[in-house]
Amino acid sequence: MQNIAVVILNWNGLNLLKSHLPNVIKNSGNARIIVADNASTDDSVDFIKNNFPTVEIISNLKNEGFAKGYNEALKRIESEFYVLLNNDVEVSENWLNPLINVFSDSKVVGCQPKIISFNDRSFFEHAGASGGYIDRNYFPFCRGRIFDAIEKDNNQYDSKEEVFWSTGAALMIRAKEFHSVNGFDEDFFAHMEEIDLCWRLKKKGFKFMVEPSSKVYHIGGGTLPYQSPKKVYLNFRNSLMMLIKNHEGMLFPKLFNRLCLDGIAAIRFIFKGEFKQFAAVFNAHLYQYARLGSLLKKRKAIKKASTVFNASGIYKGSIVWKYYVKGVRQFSQLNKTLFR
């Protein structure tokens, strides 16, 4: 596994490194283990140097989030495959072997394991579960998680499948192709940058997979709680950025429809008394208006570089309608014929 570099992005995660780094080292064979540190101030770097001399360290000059933090670090790592791994993930024995085997298909550019909750190991974890999808309005969901409804893992999603996106919490990806699209979009800072990356690579005909025979345990929500106003802002903002950059057809009718759906979500926040979350959605929309010109330039560049769009993993229905109106809480309840 000398051609695999497991890269853990860290910012003030000393306690998480103490808990999980020994496990990653133990279970990753002879893969390179690298910690990319985003200018931590909590002795993370000294802890690694003093206790794990075989772990390589890349020190970024400042904390610029998930997207730029990884971009800067990966420019300095030569390897055939990267595994981007959150610092709050416990891995299972020989977890890398099933993932690397998926790449025998030359069209596969990225793959994730099954993501299980660290705190309750009978349930999937929010960030990725057993593979990611998007609906016709580009709302993301997973096998095992639709919005906030997280399913119990009864091995119902243990088949290896092609998906639309693979989670950045534990993502194996071909290094050459990661760099071919200039990595993550750094304007995202954090959240959904991996979906945008997958989308851009799928526009070159590549595939993303989930391989559930590899399993990891993710704490999740360690940096930001799931319903924090900042996370709400980033999720709504970044989702709109993805739409503007990557939507295949006429942009503005689709964008208008999505803005209306976001407005309904914002009104729900008001009725629930979550006024900071309402403001987060409002500010996310203002961001798009202020930067529409630059986003359209990115859209033009992506379209120019695209070849054949691999649309596998798009649900042609509305996951919002299914969840909030029809009461669907399980991926298995969705009509499989509506998936591309």
Image (tube, helix red, strand yellow):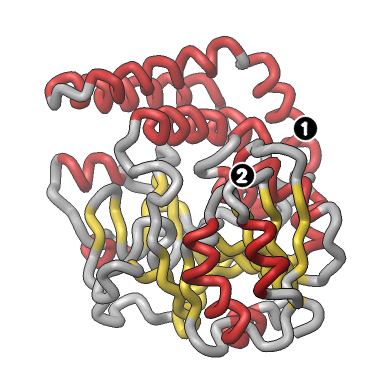
Q: Nearer the viewer, mark 1 or mark 2?
A: 2
Circle nearer the N terminus (1, 2):
2
Q: Secondary structure at mark 2?
A: loop
For label 1, the residue is: 301
- Name which quarter of the figure residue 116 lies in: bottom left
Q: Dot 1, crowdedness within 10 Å: few (<14), some or many (≥20)? A: few
- Name which quarter of the figure residue 104 lies in: bottom right
- Seen from the viewer's position, the closer of residues 138 and 71 is 71
Q: Is residue 295 above or below residue 57?
A: above
Q: Position of residue 106 (x, y in %)?
A: 74, 74
For label 2, the residue is: 41
- Seen from the viewer's position, the closer of residues 272 and 288 is 272
Left of 88 or right of it: where is 107? right
Q: Position of residue 251 (x, y in %)?
A: 55, 25
Work out whether residue 109 can be spotted: no
Left of 169 or right of it: where is 183? right
Gap in Å between the C-alphas at discs 1 and 2? 38 Å
